[in-house]
């Protein structure tokens, strides 16, 4: 960060993103405006990204559904971006009333250029010329999150649910910001969702890798793609609450965390925890392809059909084939929203592949444990499975990465399973975590 004119306080460029629960109503908008103006008055340049107010995006989706069972993707994106436009305009008004200058911009105006994949567009370029001009004028740019404009078609796109985090990080990286602050309704990243585990503990630091695995495991605090983006640009993320002044959680590289810890007075005594957290994801479905002929190429045929249909696969398990039949079952999980499409895609190749039937199950949860320390500490799996066994939780599928263990259980056992793991790995805090609002965004 550079020093201010009088060389006193270090100032910098701070990108702040406010989620829907932080701007849920008129009073919240004014409260957030105050916070932005205070940061600006302290000498910093501030760029703000906003989500739609409260449940606006869900309400707009409901509206679309009432009008049309299968709304055109281009028009649905146009509709949904309206939510963030409302926020940006009212927030700019509230800032004006506090005596500062704010200017609102749509994603397109702010230079967020995407591909044309409506509903799940990827950012391919960021050209924030107008944002830079506003900063140069000491105005506060307010940018609508979760949206951009397609390079080829020039149509308005959205980045997928929760995409405002990604807008914030992408803009922060393009502008060379010192930090991207993500404001939400809890104090930071916790060892578990505090709504499910009241004894969840707040983390001071978490690495990009751990945060990626936590996000992929269903932790709702940050959008997966925003973490990928931040890691690529080594951009510090500070997740914190807009309802309190407390310091939140810093998402950084392993090296940056080690440096920050070493710089504290008790730095040499601090050891990073082995486990950084747990997560539960109840949005997946499980599909079993029954009695697949056990010969080369069958798995390829199944997953090619699914890939062609655009299905994101998460876990995969293949049973040992029955010696008598020479057939095997292949089970995989995918997002519930894609399950119908996945079933249809497989039905279409049933005769070619020669499997017997498809089983569908959406009463499942994926429970995960994440921690960079797993790489170097034996016994994590033993503790993991003993804790679930003691809690009477049955495990249906297992998958692991270097720093994560995930299992599929019945959805009814999810909370119990997460709490058991949280306790078994010594993550329980003494007090209860504070949840300031309801939505987790
Ligand atoms: N408003 C959008 C959503 O609810 C984007 C966001 O909040 O990040 O998904
Ligand atoms: Mg939202």
Image (cartoon, grey):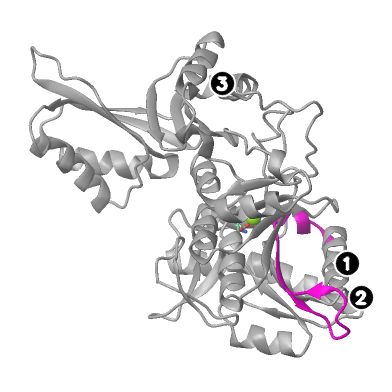
**Residue at horizontal 62 percent and vertical 66 percent from the top:** 168
* Image location of residue 75, percent across then percent down: 49, 68
Figure quadrant of the N terminus: bottom right
SS type, badge 1: helix
CB under 8 Å between discs 1 and 2: yes
Residue 24 is one of the magenta-drawn residues: yes
Q: Which residue corresponds to mark 3? A: 417
Foreground disc of the pair 3, 2: 3
**Residue at horizontal 92 percent and vertical 80 percent from the top:** 99
Q: Which residue corresponds to mark 2? A: 98
Quadrant of the image where one finds ligand 1: bottom right
Please provide the residue range marked out in magenta: 1-26
Q: Which residue corresponds to mark 1? A: 34
**Residue at horizontal 26 percent and vertical 50 percent from the top:** 307
Which residue is situated farthest in the right direction here?
98
Mark with earlier residue (3, 1)? 1
- Please give left or right for residue 98 compared with residue 420 in the image: right
Which residue is situated farthest in the front direction here?
268
């Amino acid at each position: 960060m550079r020093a201010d004119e009088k060389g006193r306080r270090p100032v910098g460029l701070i990108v702040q993103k406010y989620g829907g629960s932080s701007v849920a109503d008129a009073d919240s908008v004014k409260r957030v405006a105050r916070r932005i103006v205070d940061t600006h008055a302290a000498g910093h340049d501030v760029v703000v990204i906003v989500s739609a107010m409260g449940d606006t995006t869900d309400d707009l989706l409901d509206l679309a559904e009432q009008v049309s069972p299968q709304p055109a993707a281009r028009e649905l994106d146009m509709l949904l971006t309206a939510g963030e436009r409302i926020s940006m305009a009212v927030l700019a008004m509230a800032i004006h009333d506090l005596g500062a200058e704010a200017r609102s911009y749509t994603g397109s105006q702010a230079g967020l250029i995407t591909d044309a994949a409506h509903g799940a567009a990827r950012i391919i370029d960021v050209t924030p010329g107008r944002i830079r001009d506003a900063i140069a004028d000491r105005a506060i740019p307010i940018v609508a999150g979760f949206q951009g404009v397609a390079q080829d078609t020039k149509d308005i796109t959205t980045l997928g649910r929760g995409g405002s985090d990604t807008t914030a990080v992408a803009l922060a990286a393009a502008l060379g910001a010192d930090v991207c602050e993500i404001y939400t309704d809890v104090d930071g990243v916790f060892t578990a969702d505090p709504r499910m585990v009241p004894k969840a503990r707040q983390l001071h630091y978490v690495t990009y890798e751990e945060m990626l695995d936590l996000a992929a495991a269903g932790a709702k605090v940050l959008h997966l793609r925003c973490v990928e983006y931040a890691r690529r640009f080594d951009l510090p993320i500070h997740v914190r609450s807009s309802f309190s002044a407390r310091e939140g959680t810093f998402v950084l590289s392993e090296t940056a965390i080690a440096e920050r810890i070493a710089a504290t007075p008790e730095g040499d005594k601090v050891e990073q925890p082995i486990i950084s957290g747990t997560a539960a994801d109840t949005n997946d479905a499980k599909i079993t392809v029954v009695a697949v002929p056990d010969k080369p190429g069958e798995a390829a045929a199944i997953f090619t059909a699914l890939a062609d249909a655009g299905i994101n696969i998460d876990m995969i398990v293949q049973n040992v084939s029955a010696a008598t039949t020479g057939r095997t079952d292949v089970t995989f999980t995918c997002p519930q929203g894609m399950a119908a499409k996945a079933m249809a895609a497989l039905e279409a190749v049933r005769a070619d592949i020669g499997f017997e039937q498809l089983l569908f199950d959406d009463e499942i949860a994926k429970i995960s444990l994440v921690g960079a320390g797993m790489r170097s500490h034996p016994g994590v799996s033993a503790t993991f499975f003993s804790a679930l066994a003691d809690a009477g939780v049955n495990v249906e599928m297992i998958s692991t990465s270097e720093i994560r263990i995930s299992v599929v259980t019945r959805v009814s056992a999810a909370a119990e399973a997460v709490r058991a793991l949280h306790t078994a790995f010594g993550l329980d805090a003494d007090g209860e975590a504070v949840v300031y609002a309801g939505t987790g965004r």
